[in-house]
Amino acid sequence: MKINYVLNRDAKIAVKDIPVVKKSPNLYKFDYPQMQRFGIKLSSLPKDSTVINRPYSFYSEHKRLVWTVIASIAALVLIILILSTNIINRRRAERALRESERQLSIRNRIAEIFLTIPDDQMYGEVLQVVLEAMGSPYGTFAYIDENGNRIVPSMTRDIWDECKIRDKGIFFPRDKWSDTLWARCLIEKKSFSSNGPFKIPDGHIQISRALATPIIHKGESVGNLMVGDKQTDYTERDKELLETIADHIAPILHVRLLSERHEKERKKAEEALQESEAKYKRLVEGSPDIIWAFSDKKGTLYSSGRVESILGPK
């Protein structure tokens, strides 16, 4: 029997007009407590399944809101990190600028002292600038003479009065150097520091900390700086600062030492010449012979006393 129509509550509908359902409208629904009872995982359910009687979850109900808040917080954290990095870099740059200005001020003061202060005061004035920069009450500024000996023309004013060693001086012969910080820095051409304790003989100044740096010009030690008794330990930063000061002093000190040595040689030559002239004059004046130097253009250049005694006054 062929059915051409079906009866609906409201009307008669032709079978051919009834749409074919290709996808089932049925929904999969699962009871959450029963799933827990039988150990069924949510991941095992068919796609687009509905779970009923599931416990309330804020994340499940407001997933978009949660991720929006997380994204906003992450963005704010990133902005804070960028700003913090910017601030840290700016502070580092400001510290570097202040340190550069400080070192420039120290160099300018030292250069002015070298150019304007006499030799007998220059070493002491430079040392005072170094001690202020290093925050140290004691120190020495020494140079190496032409014979390789260490000369300390200036110590801190207090050291000379406080040191009770007899026959103390500023001259340290090369062959008498002992195993001290300043000797090691001059020989090995690098800085040495010690934050104590020291074995100091009776009578010497009691120093608890010390830092010694060589003054090097063209690979040779021309002097050294030494500071001591800072209230806190000497650090790598202190060493770098003292080395920077020493590097600035090196060419100026070298020129100053060369000038002093040339001046000494000139004076020595002048004294030798004067002594030779005086000796020659004594020989001439004491000679019984007549010695007379004459020029056609200038006339008499020199005549010994014997000439006047024979020929009479000019």
Image (cartoon, rainbow, N blue to C red):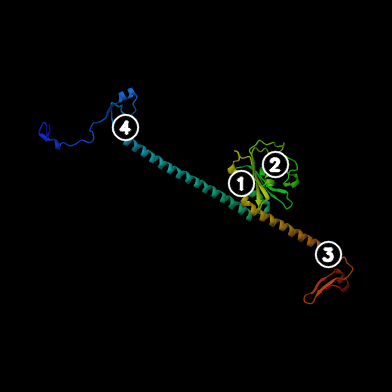
The residue located at (86%, 64%) in the rendering is 283
Residue found at the very far right of the displayed protein? 288
Q: Is residue 305 above or below residue 222?
A: below
Residue 275: x percent and y percent?
80, 61
Name the kind of residue labelled 2 in the image: Thr
**Image mark for residue 60:** 4
Earlier in the chain: of badge 1 and badge 2, it is 2
Whether tag 3 and tag 4 are in contact, CB under 8 A, the answer is: no
Name the kind of residue labelled 3 in the image: Tyr
Q: Secondary structure at mark 3?
A: helix
**Image mark for residue 180:** 2
For the N terminus, give its image quadrant.
top left
- The quadrant where residue 169 appears: top right
What is the C-alpha distance between the residues marked 2 and 3?
Answer: 51 Å
In front of the other: label 3 or label 4?
4
Q: Secondary structure at mark 1?
A: helix
